[in-house]
Image (spheres, rainbow, N blue to C red):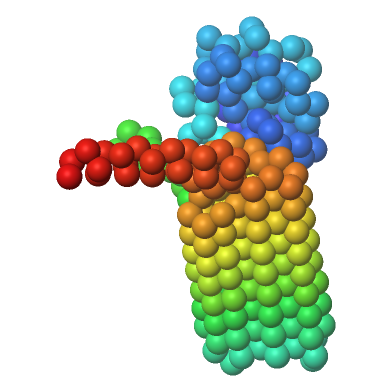
Amino acid sequence: MLLSACFENVFRDAEFESIGFIGHHPKRMLTFVSAKKYVDKVVANDSAAAVLCTSDLVDLFPSRIGVATVENPQIELYRLHNQLADNDAFCRKKIPTVIPASCKVHPMACVAENNVKIGENVTIEEFVSIKENSTIGDGCTIRAGSVIGGSGLMAKRHKNTSIFAKHYGGVSIGDGVEILQHVSVMASVFPWQDTVVGGAAIISDFALIGHGVEIGKQTFVAGSACISGSTMVGEKCFIGPSAVICNGINIGDDAFVTMGAVVINDVPDGKTVSGNPAVDHKVFLYDYMQKQRIASKLRQELK
């Protein structure tokens, strides 16, 4: 699709095939830039074919990248994304859902009629909702009340209203995954992308897996944990109860995030982090003990 077919103020025309954000890499992508500090990231991304930006930024992009100017680049990208929802060139084609005879699907579960692919020997309990564009591997169990492929919070305030980016991507769940009660695994926003749960992972009660998240094989996510969008979690990790992981974070293989930790920075392979904000567990313990000593000394002085 040509940039000039979608926007009026085109500084340099170009053809794009997908929509995404600066760090994404689909084929020939249209993205947006709202500040000068992000220009270099777009220029360095070989997948960026075109960009929406404000008029003061147009001269900063090389000739290989098409440019259209708009007042609010992020809002206009969301609007175009939503408008292209029914365009077969951008979204996934409708394919009837396939449920093998070996599966046990509770009659009070809801499985979308189209674009759901379920493997062999899958158990789906009551009040589970499986949305379109979901793939579930062999031998998985999805417990009562869970939602696979729902929408997450991708929105922007604009004047007196809010623009919500519809979720047209998918969910891909590997073989042997256990999803316990009332878990939400959100679909990705863009049609070319899946939220991924690796094989033999276990996601416990009330956990929330955001759009575009990728969870590695044999990783355990404990109850009420929240993994925000576009986060990458490695293999054989442990995400503790009520832990919160910021969007766009990378968690390495064999990492351990303790109970209630708030992770705002990347976590290397094999590292254990604790606290709010989360730091190396040994640093957290040292700081805690120092505070306990100070508190004990103050209590003694007040007696």
Q: Is residue 239 above or below residue 22?
A: below
Q: Which x, y percent locates residue 11?
A: 63, 14
Q: Nearer the viewer, residue 155 or 71?
A: 155
Q: Which x, y percent locates residue 297?
A: 31, 39
**Residue at x 64%, y 78% (from the top left corner):** 142
**Residue at x 53%, y 22% (from the top left corner):** 34
User: In the displayed structure, does residue 244 sit left or right of residue 179?
Assistant: left
Q: Which x, y percent locates residue 77?
A: 56, 35
Residue 9, can we see it? Answer: no
Q: Is residue 184 above or below residue 154?
A: below
Residue 142, can we see it? Answer: yes
Q: Which x, y percent locates residue 52?
A: 59, 25
**Residue at x 58%, y 16% (from the top left corner):** 37
**Residue at x 81%, y 77% (from the top left corner):** 138
- Quarter of the figure with the C terminus: top left
Q: Nearer the viewer, residue 268 or 138?
A: 268
- Quarter of the figure with the N terminus: top right
Q: Residue furthest left?
A: 303
In which quadrant of the rendered view does residue 159 lie? top left
Q: Is residue 233 above or below residue 121?
A: above
Q: Nearer the viewer, residue 242 or 62?
A: 242
How many numbered marks have been drawn onto this rendered protein structure? 0
